[in-house]
Amino acid sequence: MPAGGIRIHACAADGPGSTYASWTTLMSENDPSSLPAVRRANFWSTLSVICVCVTLAWITHQLFRPPPSLPPARLWTPIVVTGGGEETIIQAGTRRLEFWTPSGRTRDYLARDGGAVRDRDKWEAIPSDEPVQQFGALLRTNSDVLGYRRAEVWGQGHTIFKPGWWWTITVTTNYSAQNLVHAYRGFWKSTNTIYVERIENPGQE
């Protein structure tokens, strides 16, 4: 047998009682037509496994990576301008709440059943704006209410087109929409749905 060769001996039987046939195959490890092909197959198999592992690792990273830690976006920036033209940003961590109340003119535009104001709307039929003034004073008794403004508006939602006051109050984040609703219902004695718009000012300076 040539040096460096590998001899493989195999036997096969044709059936019971048959004679055995045998042969010997000689394969040289230096045969250029065998080993390079095996190496190429191993290379591509290894490369395929690596690609699959890298892909799975990337997908896992995308699914389970924590969200980036960014400061909260400022949705509203309240500022004051001094007499000298200098701007000062009001403290961060505040919010703005906006809502509607009746005015002294609302009663003339309320829906009626048989000529009378419906029971659910009677709280809106105020004789003047004196209750509106009192409600503003009530809001200011809470130290978390930094200030407010109101403007007479006309509008229509689930009810008819009518006038009223649209309020904008600036409060700290300790004052929630639920705090407002509690004060609103306690003063106006209404159990109707209350529409509130909330604008946040969570930015950091």
Image: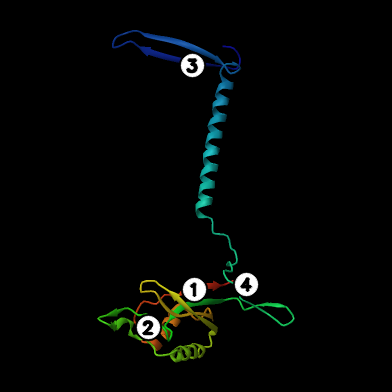
Residue kind at label 1, given as amino acid type: Arg
Camera-side residue of 203 and 114: 114
Helix, strand or loop at disc 4? loop
Q: Quadrant of residue 28?
A: top right
Q: Is residue 6 above or below residue 121?
A: above
Q: Is residue 98 above or below residue 8?
A: below
For disc 1, the marked residue is 198
Q: Quadrant of residue 78?
A: bottom right
Quadrant in which the N terminus appears: top right
Most extreme residue toward the right is: 84
> Mark 1, mark 2: which one is toward the viewer?
2
User: Which residue is pictured at 47% across the width and 73% down the height?
Assistant: 197
Q: Residue 8 bears which disc, if any? A: 3
For disc 2, the marked residue is 108
Q: Mark 4 vs mark 1: which is more N-terminal?
A: 1
- Marks 3 and 2 sit apart, C-alpha to C-alpha, by 111 Å
Label 2 Cα crowd, 10 Å radius (few <14 / some 14-19 / many 20+): few
Q: Residue 204 bears which disc, if any? A: 4
- Marks 4 and 1 sit apart, C-alpha to C-alpha, by 19 Å
